[in-house]
Amino acid sequence: MARKVLVLVGSKKGAFILESDEGRKSWELKGPFCETWPMNHVIGDRSSGVIYGAGGNEWFGPAVWKSTDLGATWTHSSRGLAYPEGDTPIKSVWSLAAGHGRLYAGVEPAGLFVSEDRGGRFSLVEGLYQDPTRPEWQPGGAGLILHSLVLDPADERRMWVAISAAGVFYTEDGGTTWRPRNKGTRVDFLPDGPQYPEFGQCVHCLVMAAGRPNRLYQQNHCGMYRSDDGGESWVSIEAGLPSSFGFPAAAHPHDPDGLFFFPLNGAEKGRFPPEASAAVWRTQDGGAHWQAKQDGLPTERAYFGVLRQAMATDSLDPAGVYFGSSSGALYASADEGESWTRIAENLPMISSVETLVVEV
């Protein structure tokens, strides 16, 4: 049976979908969807084919959008997306993850909600909300946000979340209790404080290696890291990179040693590619060595950034790799990063890029 590749794009003015066949040579752009709400994260549930969008801001309020027909029609719900009375109102939904029959939503200010009915109604995950470290969480540059949700595909009780700037937290009992998982990750933006605290790290992105749920990769404000024990400890893998600063990371869909990264020149240097030369850096050995892949990318005067959720891979072989820029361009590679093509331009600022492969 033939398959269709969907690239799901969240932007500052709605969601977009690009469609192609398995060859991934030509693309059709559809959208904008979701009434041009700011869409922080758009995902596809591989088990059901449903597309979800995390949206809102302080004007619209928080909501999760949903399409059951691959983007043709959309509905949205805010039911249950609220903290207890007296707490700070939720500004927006920042991140989504679907698995084990549930839909999880990370919000700003940082917290976690879960839906048991595919986004119709949400309930607060009380264990994280009541975590004793929560009163000490501090916001990163984009606010206090829960931006990464990583589910163990084999065990519904295990889950990791990343919060900027509180760090990585882990549960092994379905969210009842949580523990910080930040050993070995540094905090060098607080010179008067501890460099390796239990929590308080500014994580930019957290992803899981394919087929190895205890291997995690982390792009941090203060470096690139890998964990082989479910986040119990972290080791630096930034040697060989032109910069350890950046926001997105995307795991290879089949190789646990494969990872893609888009370096930027630093937090205080403009946050664009080093030397204004765009490159996706790829490792095939868990971060021991890195290679720059630039064929087809702008290598001069590239003054754009790539946000934390704006890079993804598809599930095909060879794997497709995709990233969206802050300047509204979307780039695709059908050969695991060896060569690149710009498949969309002049979109609003791109907040997220994800993929969904469906049978047709």
Image (spheres, helix red, strand yellow):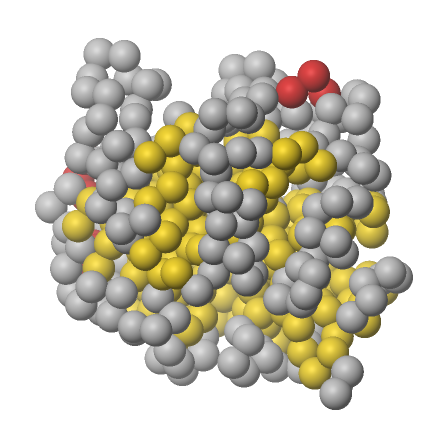
Q: Is residue 271 visible?
A: no
Give the position of the N terminus as an image quadrant: bottom right
Q: Is residue 350 visible?
A: yes
Residue nearest the viewer, comparing 243 with 89: 243
Q: Is residue 60 left or right of residue 102?
A: right
| Residue 96: % across, % down | 46, 61
| Residue 217: % across, % down | 42, 45
Can you tell which quarter of the image residue 185 is in? top left
Number of residue marks: 0
Residue nearest the viewer, comparing 146 with 318: 318
Residue at 57% across, 69% down? 44
Residue at 83% across, 47% down? 341
Q: Is residue 297 left or right of residue 153?
A: right
Q: Is residue 311 above or below residue 34?
A: above
Give the position of the C terminus as an image quadrant: bottom right
Residue nearest the viewer, comparing 69 with 19: 19
| Residue 357: % across, % down | 66, 72
In this view, the residue farthest toward the left is 132
Can you tell which quarter of the image residue 125 is in? bottom left
| Residue 336: % across, % down | 69, 51
In this view, the residue farthest toward the bottom is 1
Q: Is residue 233 left or right of residue 101?
A: left
